[in-house]
Amino acid sequence: MTGLLEAQDVSVRYGSLAALDGVDLRIHDGQRHALIGPNGAGKTTLLNVIGGSTRPHRGTVRFDGRDVGRLGPAARARRGINRIHQRPAVFPTLTATENVVVAALPRVVGRRRWWPGGRRRAAQRLAGPLLDQMGLTAVAAVPAGHLAHGQRRQLEIAMALAGRPRLLLLDEPAAGLSAIEVGRLVELLQALPRAVAVLLVEHRLDLVYALSDTVTVLRDGQTLAAGTPDEIRTSPLVRQAYADGVA
Amino acid sequence: MRGEVIRRVRGGIAALVLVGLVVAPWVVDDYTTSILARTLALALVGVSVALLTGVAGMPTLGQTAPYAAGAYACAVVGSRVSDVGVVQLVVAAAAGALLAALTVPLVVHARGVIVLMITLAIGELVVIVLGRWRSVTGGTDGLAGIPAVRPFWGLPALADDQARYLYALAVVATLVGAVLVLLRTRAGLVLRAGRDDETRLRASGHRVALHLSGAHIAAGAIAGAAGSLLVVAQQYISPADFGFDTSALLLLGVVIGGTASVGGALVGAALVIAVRDWLFGVLPGHAPLVLGALFVATVYLLPTGVNRARGRLRPPGVPALQANPPAAPDQATVAELRR
C-alpha cells in the first residue's frame, strides 16, 4: 500500500553534525503519527524537510505519489502539506478573520473563484465556521497581534485547516500553553477531520499517547523505534533513550 | 465606538482637504497653482512609494525611475504623436510599468537596505541614461515646448495653470481612489499579510514573489502616470527632475506620513515638497541639509510616522498585547530602513 507521505533515507548534515541520518517515514491518509525523541534527535529537522524549508542532503520525499523534494514550502502547502509552528505564526496586523481568509485563498475551489472577488468571498465563507469551531468568533475582528498566546495557537490551527490540508505538521503545539489551553488544544486536535493525516512533534508523552495512532522515536538523527503508543510506552530502548536524553 | 469616530473624523478631514484642493486655484496666484500641480504629481509618486514601502514591505529609493520613464514617454508622445491626456496617461503608466517589470528580477528577492541600494542604483542609472540619450531625451537640456494637453478627444487644450492643475487633481484623485480600492481587495490583503510575515505567507501556499512583482509593477505604473502629470504641469522636463534628492524627499515624505497609509503618503510628500520649495527661498543653498536633518529626526522620533503614531495606542475594547508578541510591522518597516 502506498503512503500519503513517504520519506526515504533522509539525511541532513550541519557541518560535521548529522541532524538526520537515513531516516524513513511513511504516513497514510488520515493517520495520526507522532515523532518523539530527546532534544537534538532531529524531530524538527525532519518536519522541516517534509514541510520544504530544509533541503535534505540525501533521500527522497514523496507526497501523494509525487516527488516533492524540489518544491518549496509554498508549493507543498498548495498540495496539502500545512504546518503549525512551535511559536504561533499569524499575521499580527490582520484581524483573525483576515488571517484565516489569507490562509484559505491559495486552496479555494469552485468555479466562482474566477469571478472578480469570488476567491475572497469563498475564503470569507470558510473563515466564519472555522473561527467558530476554534472558539474565536468573539475576537474575529481583533488584530491577531492582540490575541493571547493560546488564541493565536487556535487561530493558527484554523488557518491550517483553511488551507484544506491532507497532512498537518504540528511542531510542539502545546508549547507555552496553560493546562486549560492544552486541554482545549487536545479537544480541537481530536476533532480534526478524519481525512487529515497528522505528523505531531511533541515532548509531552501524555499528549502523544492521546493524539496518535503510531509513533516513531528518533535519537541522534536515526530511527530508534516505531510502533503503536502501547509498544513505544513499554519499549526498554525508548526508556533508555529518554533517560539518556534527559541526563 | 472610538474607532468609528476616528474613521469619520479622518473622512471629514479628507473631504475638507479635497474641497480645499478644488477651490485652491481660485484662491492662490498662478505661480502657486503651477507649484501645486507639480506637487500633486510628486505626491502621486509618494503614493507609489508608500505602496511599495509600507504595504508591500519593499522600501525604495528608485521610484523616480518609472516616474522619469512615464514623464519622458509622455513628453515624446505629447510632442510627436498625440496631445490627448488619456493617451499620454496610458502611455506614461505603461512606460513606468514596463521599466518596473524589467527591474523586477533585481528587486523582488532582495529585502531591507539591499532593496534601497538596488533601487537607488536603478534610479541613478536612469538619470544617466536620460542625460546621454540626447536624440530622444534632449540630454541634460531636457525636453521643452511640449504642447498643452487636452484631456479627451474634442475637448480644448488646457491653456492656463488653473486648468492644468484641475486636470492633475482629477487624475490624482482617480488614481488614489483606485489604489484605495485595490488595497481592499484580495491583492491588498495578501500584500499586507506578506509585510507582516513573509515566511508565514509562503507557508500558507502563496506565491510571494509573484505578489511582490505585481505590486512593483503597479507602483511603477502609478509613478509613470505621475510623470505624465509633471509634463502637463511644467511642459518641460529634464533629468534634474528625477535625481536622488527627489527620491530621498519622497521617501522622507512617506516616512513622515506613515509608510502604510496612502493618505499619509500624499500629505507627507506634499508637505516635504512644500517645505523644500519654501526653504529654497529662506535658506538658499542649505535646503538639502535641513531636509537631511529632518529625515534623521523623523526616523528616530517617529518610527511609525505622524499618521501612524496613534497605532501605538491599543484599539478600543481590545485586550493588551500579550507577552512576547510578534513584531509590530509598522515599526518593522522603518526598522528595515535602519538596518
Image (tube, coloured by chain):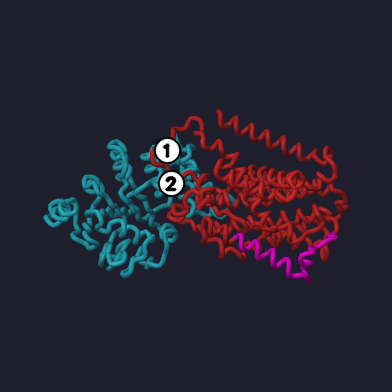
Chain colours: A cyan, B red
Q: Residue placed at 67% from the left, 64% from the top? A: B126
Q: What residue span does the magenta drawing correspond to?
A: B119-146
Quadrant placement of the N terminus of chain A: bottom left
Q: Residue beneath label 1, please? A: A147
Quadrant of res B99: bottom right
Looking at the magenta stretch, what is its main secondary structure? helix
Q: Are marks 2 and 1 in contact (CB under 8 Å)?
A: yes
Apparent side of residue B59 relative to residue A75 in the rendered image (left or right): right
Q: Residue placed at 84% from the left, 54% from the top? A: B150
Q: CA distance from mark 2 to mark 1?
A: 10 Å
Label located before the other in sequence (2 or 1) = 2
In front here: B280 or B83? Answer: B280
Label at residue A90: 2
Q: Residue placed at 16% from the left, 54% from the top? A: A244
Q: Look at the numbered disc 2 and give the secondary structure of its residue.
A: loop
In front here: A171 or B21? Answer: B21
Badge 2 sits on which subunit?
A
